[in-house]
């Protein structure tokens, strides 16, 4: 990756393709090039961004991009050019944690980029920080989170849910297989393939009764798992736009599932299958949300304003703060030109599409082939 997350759009008046930066990790190629949230990319390698090449901005190895600005006459290349070389990155998904005070409330804000269990200790550090700051409310920003592993999702849920729910290991999620496998797991009492309970072994237990999630079309898979899984047990308020709509899980099938001797799969080097095999539901049976979850509070994500994540002037965060406190966030309006446009895709890396559409990892491996 280059270390940035992009939204891709077209301007309605010209049909011109563009990309706009959603967020940037520090110390990455994009950050070193000076890119920041709200920057507009209008050219790639000195040529137009098109339907055929726009995802090269995520999957390319070396790029030169031309930055633009919106003015009265449209978009113009006034930001110069920057060059980047992609690197293999291991990035902590806990990108921002901060506390904002408003009308007597202390509101913790957490931006979580994707669900990776190897970084659960970062969730611990964030939640411990919020406890030490004695926050009254929690806002978790999942608007760009494509999903990831169920271990990380259940860990987050167990870290913030009411204590009695966590300590009693209540049912968080159930799996729904086809009739053949559902009966097999039930007959053999293999609970790990039928449900995910809350876990009582998280390092930090916040024991909250309500939480706000910031959402958008990039909120998918394990993010939706989190929202729907918590909904029966606490007051869950979503702010932003409708989520992606991903309620299924898959298995990564590799040659060792068939052959015990590694020499048998030499000719199958570097391959796997990713079949969808299961759907999930919360403890109340909510599933099949193919159209996503509509937000409780509809708010447009204003990327062009370039307001930093965690700043209470960000429209989604501001709406959550107002819902919590009953008092609006009053901010100075920036003078800028609005040009009608449509966002049609987004992503952090070339793997985000897989996370949104297929992967809900960590369904435990069993010998499924009989």
Image (cartoon, grey):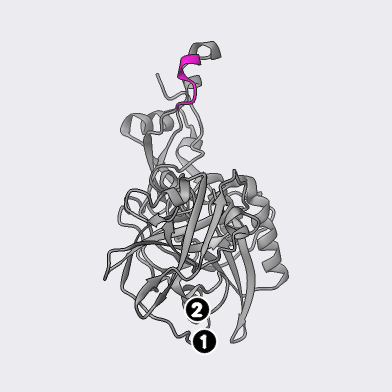
- Horizontal and vertical percent position of residue 258: 46, 17
Instruction: Answer yes or no: is residue 337 visible.
Output: yes
Judged left or right of residue 161, residue 227 is left
C-alpha distance separating marks 2 and 1:
10 Å
Q: Is residue 185 magenta?
A: no
Judged left or right of residue 9, residue 149 is right
Image disc number at residue 331: 1
Q: Residue at x 32, y 63 (%)?
A: 16
- Horizontal and vertical percent position of residue 209: 55, 68
Q: Residue at x 64, y 63 (%)?
A: 206
Does 1 appear above or below 180? Answer: below
Image disc number at residue 318: 2
Q: Residue at x 55, y 14 (%)?
A: 262
Observer-nearest residue: 136 or 129? 129
Does 336 appear above or below 166? Answer: below
Q: Residues within 10 Å of mark 2 (few under 14, many from 20)?
A: many
């Amino acid at each position: 990756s280059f270390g940035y997350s992009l939204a891709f759009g077209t301007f309605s008046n010209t049909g011109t393709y563009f990309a706009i930066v959603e967020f940037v990790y520090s110390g990455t190629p994009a950050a070193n090039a000076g890119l920041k949230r709200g920057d507009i990319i209008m050219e790639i390698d000195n040529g137009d961004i098109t339907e055929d090449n726009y995802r090269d901005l995520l999957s390319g190895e070396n790029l030169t991009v031309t930055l633009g600005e919106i003015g009265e006459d449209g978009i113009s290349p006034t930001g110069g050019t920057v060059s980047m070389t992609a690197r293999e990155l291991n990035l902590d998904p806990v990108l921002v944690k901060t506390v904002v005070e408003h009308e007597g409330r202390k509101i913790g804000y957490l931006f979580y980029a994707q669900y990776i269990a190897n970084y659960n200790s970062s969730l611990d550090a964030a939640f411990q920080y919020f406890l030490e700051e004695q926050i009254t409310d929690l806002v978790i920003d999942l608007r760009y989170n494509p999903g990831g592993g169920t271990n990380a999702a259940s860990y987050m849920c167990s870290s913030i849910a009411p204590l009695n729910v966590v300590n009693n290991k209540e049912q968080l999620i159930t799996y729904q297989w086809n009739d053949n496998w559902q009966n097999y797991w039930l007959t053999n009492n293999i609970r790990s393939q039928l449900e995910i309970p809350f876990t009582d072994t998280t390092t930090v237990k916040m024991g909250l009764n309500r939480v706000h999630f910031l959402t958008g079309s990039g909120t998918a898979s394990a993010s939706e798992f989190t929202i729907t899984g918590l909904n029966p047990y606490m007051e869950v308020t979503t702010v932003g736009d409708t989520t992606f709509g991903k309620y299924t899980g898959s298995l990564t099938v590799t040659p060792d599932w068939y052959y015990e001797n590694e020499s048998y799969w030499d000719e199958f080097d570097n391959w796997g299958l990713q079949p969808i095999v299961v759907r999930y539901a919360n403890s109340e049976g909510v599933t099949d949300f193919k159209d996503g979850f509509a937000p409780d509070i509809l708010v447009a994500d204003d990327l062009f304003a370039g307001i930093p994540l965690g700043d209470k002037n960000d429209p989604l965060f501001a709406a959550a703060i107002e819902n919590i406190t009953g008092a609006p966030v009053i901010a100075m309006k920036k003078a800028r030109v609005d040009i009608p446009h449509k966002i049609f895709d987004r992503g952090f890396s070339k793997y985000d599409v897989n996370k949104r559409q297929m992967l809900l990892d960590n369904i435990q491996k069993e010998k499924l082939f009989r």
